Image (cartoon, grey):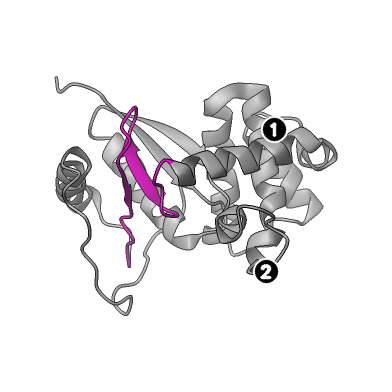
Amino acid sequence: MSEQIALDFYLDVSCRWTWWASLWLRRVARQQPISISWKIFSLAVQDNPDNYREPPARPHHVRDVDLHRALVAARQTGGKDAVERLYRAYGNVIHADKADIRDATLQAGCLTEAGLSPTLFDEAQRDPATETELVAETRAALASGVLGTPSLSLTGSDASLLGPVLGRVPDDAEALELWRGVRFALEHPYVYELKRGRDRGTPGELRAE
């Protein structure tokens, strides 16, 4: 059996590119011994690390801070596994169902599905520690070289990789082929960048199981 690989995956809940990459990585992890740590990263804080509410703040990034604070609260309550479960529930509502995650019934349903208190979202907004932790965590990731979401790094490495940014979610066989290239890039920090325009592909199935 191949040696298990530990990965850090940096996510912003509402970023569709991050969701598509997470679906790809989940497919890889079902076929390869990979342990994923889901890292909370706010694009609002990346926009302005000093004060994410001030220019050049992007309103949709600022709006989504509340979801990230809920993820922080989930981790405080149930550890990294709770982050994975809640991100999966949120992603299915936001990206697969195209539904309003701030609908009270849907929000409570996501929390319950993740094995958390249905009131955790509201509790997270009342607790200033969730905001403090989110900002500090994102700033630390930026200082370590994380360039945005989705980003990957080998756990313990100081070299992260932005991407992969995908135009569709590959099937199981293609997912493994892509993983081999991504793993090479992760293990060889001299690989900087490959890029093309985002005008190809359709996402396919967007639901996480």
Tag 1 secondary structure: helix
Res. 118 in view: no
| Nearest the eye: 20 or 52 | 52
The amino acid at mark 1 is Ala
Q: Picture coordinates of residue 197 (x, y %)?
A: 29, 77
Numbered badge on residue 28: none
Q: Which residue is mark 1?
A: 73
Span highlighted in magenta in the image: 144-167
Q: Picture coordinates of residue 50 (x, y %)?
A: 65, 53
The amino acid at mark 2 is Pro
As displayed, is residue 45 above or below residue 198?
Answer: above
With 93 as the anchor, is 185 left or right in this view? left
Q: Residue furthest right?
A: 126
As displayed, is residue 14 above or below residue 116?
Answer: below
Q: Which residue is mark 2?
A: 55
Tag 2 secondary structure: loop
Q: Picture coordinates of residue 209 (x, y %)?
A: 45, 42
